[in-house]
Amino acid sequence: MPKLIIDDQEIEVASGTKVIQAAEQLGIMIPRFCYHPALGSVGACRVCAVKLLEGRLKGVQMSCMIDAQDGMVVSTTDEEAVDFRTHVIEWLMLNHPHDCPVCDEGGHCLLQDMTVSGGHGIRRYLGKKRTYQDQYLGPLIRHEMNRCIHCYRCSRFYQEFCGYRDLGALQSANRTYFGRFQDGILDSPFTGNLSDICPTGVYTDKPSRFRGRRWDYQRSPSLCIHCCLGCHTIATGRYREIVRQEARFSEAVNGHFICDRGRYGFFYANHEARPRRARVAGDEVSYDQALQALKAKLAEISKRSGPGAIACVSSDRSSLETQAVLKRIGRMRGWRNFSGFMPQGLAQKVQLAVARLEPALSVSLRELEGADFIVVVGADPINEAPMLALALRQARRKGAAIAVIDPRPIALPFDFQHVAMVPGAISLGLGLLARGSPDEAAIEKLGPPVSDFYAALPTPEVMNASDQKRLSPLIRDLRSSRRPVIVCGTAVGPATVVGLAADWALLLQAVGKKAGLFYLLPGANAFSAGILSDPEDTFEKTVEGIENGSIKALMLVENNPFWQFPDRARLEQALARLDLLVVLDYLNSAAAQQAHIFLPTATLYEIGGLFVNQEGRVQAAQRAHSGGIPIAQSGGGGHPPRIYGAGVPGAEPRPAWRTLAELVEEVVPPDEARMQSEVGVWLAEEDPRFADLPPFAELPEDGARLNHKRDGASRFLVNWTAELQKSRGFDDSFELLAVDWTFGTEELAVYSACLKALERKPGLLMHPDDAGRLGLTDGDEVAMQLDRGTLKVPVGVVANMAPGVIVLPRHRLLEWQRLACGRIRLERDRIRKAASPQGPKP
Amino acid sequence: MLDEELRGSLTRKIAGIEHPRELVVDVMFALQEHYGYLSDEAVREAAELLDMSPLEVDEIATFYTFVYREPVGKYVIHVCDSVICWMGGYESLRDHLCRKLGIRLGETTADGLFTLLPVCCIGYCDRAPAMLVNRQVYGCLTPAKIDEIVAKLKDSAHMSGE
């Protein structure tokens, strides 16, 4: 632990700390351009010069390149160092176009700050400036190369940190150019970060271009709700709309960056079609009228058919407050409360994951970066939770071996081993790895249940030779690892895998490895939805209840089954039978349009809210603006209409939890602050895991992890005979998997126009062997014949997936819900080449 | 398009080494030889051969002086602008070349014979000022010597029927 003096202040830092970091710990911000904590030091820009007065090294040095050492005396204010920096700034500014008035970076530009603070107020250089041609980089990032000061942050972030290969440094010396080989949309799903890390205006945020200066905006800490990771964001509001989102640093979750789905997924909140008025029977009414109508109707149904005829469905995109109030009022009134998880078996998997994530096993996203061996099972990181892929890459860069066991075609920005297995075989694969992982003598000593579990693990013979061969190098890596982590998804694998992942992690810990467990869940608040939903009930049962007449009224809270429920025809018939369909939402969804009573709700940008990420971390988003119709919409580009009245126009949407609370008078608290503390009490009553949470107003920046209760009873229970049965697969048919993609399948982000150009063309993916057997080639149009109709889709033939499985994205452009698919079997003769209009090819 | 023979020989060469991208300069020169310069098509082909992205190849191609990303003349004259040649009068020689050929640095004569480019040090400092024409080095340059060299190159181009 070296101790050094910086500007007359003594500080002790961890060894390996650079002088620039040590100064930062003292609150001294040494100027920097190329240095970034996530990217490390390169010493390219020369602006972080300081003078070393005492110690082994003396004189002007780059503070980002020098390790803090004992006895070092550093001056950041020494005349020579200041003079050095002043000249570096002037020299970096030689070619800069000084176009701050028309540059979107102006106002929060590091180069502006450094130029001013470096004392370079007046330009002396009168020569010609170097100019560049800019490139089209896609809908998210605007390119303006003339402003570049060659710090290399962009290419280092893009290539080294993220692992994408289409943006980099071209040419040399004074002509160095950061760009692509040719104009075109950037490949990486993390491009928005370029606008955050560029110290000047070379990469600026395109959707918010010319919308305002930093000081015009209302900026507040928020959260991303476009997957389960709970990355930290800064929401930026102006004129009643969200105009931009940036990454917010989080030590535990996302680090410095976020993905493009999270950054640009917010446009649903501003959408023109967003419903802002309450509706009863299709007519717009006041909020209070709708609420009264709803109360009366619910009372009537409850009286006629009993409170059990009313079903409430929560969702994994609702805030914790909303989920808690729904649970509370349901309990008070005797209504049924169903989980909002739509695909078959998903609710069970989520609840199992939530139960099995013990505190001793759980690792955060940032902790994952420190693992030295990672097995990803039944998860597709870049498509389901892109920031997970970035964390995995950081682990890989530090030397971790990474393997993915998943039937889907997996692409990740680093080298990894993909073992493509049919979903039914994944548990066998995991079992084999578990058998190979520890030394048997150590297990014997542990005694039951660990030794029994180990003894029952499958032996290699149960698996075909090629899968065995692919797994054996993993066993070698695993044996030599010290900090292995199992990343387990809930989307495609069977429920056994979820439990087995936890068992295996426990086993690894038992033999002395620092093993971790990281689950992926289906939505932003899936963790709490899993805790709060009745364990036995699923949305499928809700539909059954409607079909058999036991459910007369359905209240959908921020939930749109038309998006997720895998059987559209059945859903439509069921909803048509209802006496009352109530929808509370901020989306103009198909369900909202069919609702008998509709009440608009506010988004997290207008009210804030608590969300529990996949590791049980309760985090808070703050209100970013106070709602209303965006002035850009009401004013059509000019002055908004002069209508006199109290309140903000279009601000009728209320927090869903507030509307729900008002349904049950005795619940309504007088103010929001009291409401929050009340919610805390209810949650603690509902489940002991919520009991240790601090008051929500005092939640730390990185949130607080729920205190998981240890679920010893569900440990080490795997029926291997049943697993062997499942692993056989289907000989004469396909297993159809409906899957998520980075863009185009997430319900909220599909409202963002700027993300549409990034969507891949959706199609049916299959293995070359299967395509060959069906006589199909890549790009063919096929007709899938199903019980409920036919779906025509193009075929993509990809080698890096499991044979016997076909993969279809839950894409907004495909009516995949018509297929009645979840994880289903499909006979091979149901897929045929679609007859082309010109007739069959010879 | 690459002919099969060249593609085959490059593929064999690449298959023989552990890290294909180490051969990127060799492959670029081979393709430059084939096309006359490293065209966009050639960058893509090199990328494909070496399992790199076109950008990664282009990063290296545009870094090096002797990889030409635009069409060049039959003779590429690299006139050295490093410090020793500068002391030896590089600037006046450069101006002489420009006048003589009727082009500026970075340009090609209308007849397609000469391209004039600067180069920073060709290791011929002991005979500065110096220049390089199609990898042939000329030192102790004077305007008269340059006239002589240019005339000779023109003659040999005519002889070969250009």
Image (cartoon, grey):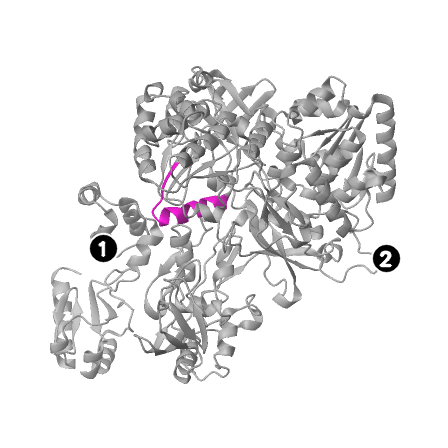
**What secondary structure is the magenta-colored segment mainly?**
helix
In front: A648, or A789?
A: A648
Question: Local crowd at mark 1 within 10 Å, few (<14), some, or many (≥20)?
Answer: some
Element type where label 2 sits in the image: loop
Q: Quadrant of the C terminus of chain A?
A: top left
Left or right relative to A632: residue A494: left
Q: Are marks 2 and 1 in contact (CB under 8 Å)?
A: no
- Disc 2 marks which residue? A646
Chain assignment, label 1: B
Q: Which residue is mark 1?
A: B25
Say whether mark 1 and mark 2 are on the same chain.
no
Q: CA distance from mark 2 to mark 1?
A: 71 Å
**Residue range highlighted in magenta:** A386-403
In the structure shown, which secondary structural element does the residue marked by tag 1 occupy?
helix
**Which is more toward the observer, A265 or B95?**
A265
- Residue at 87%, 36% (x, y): give it: A293
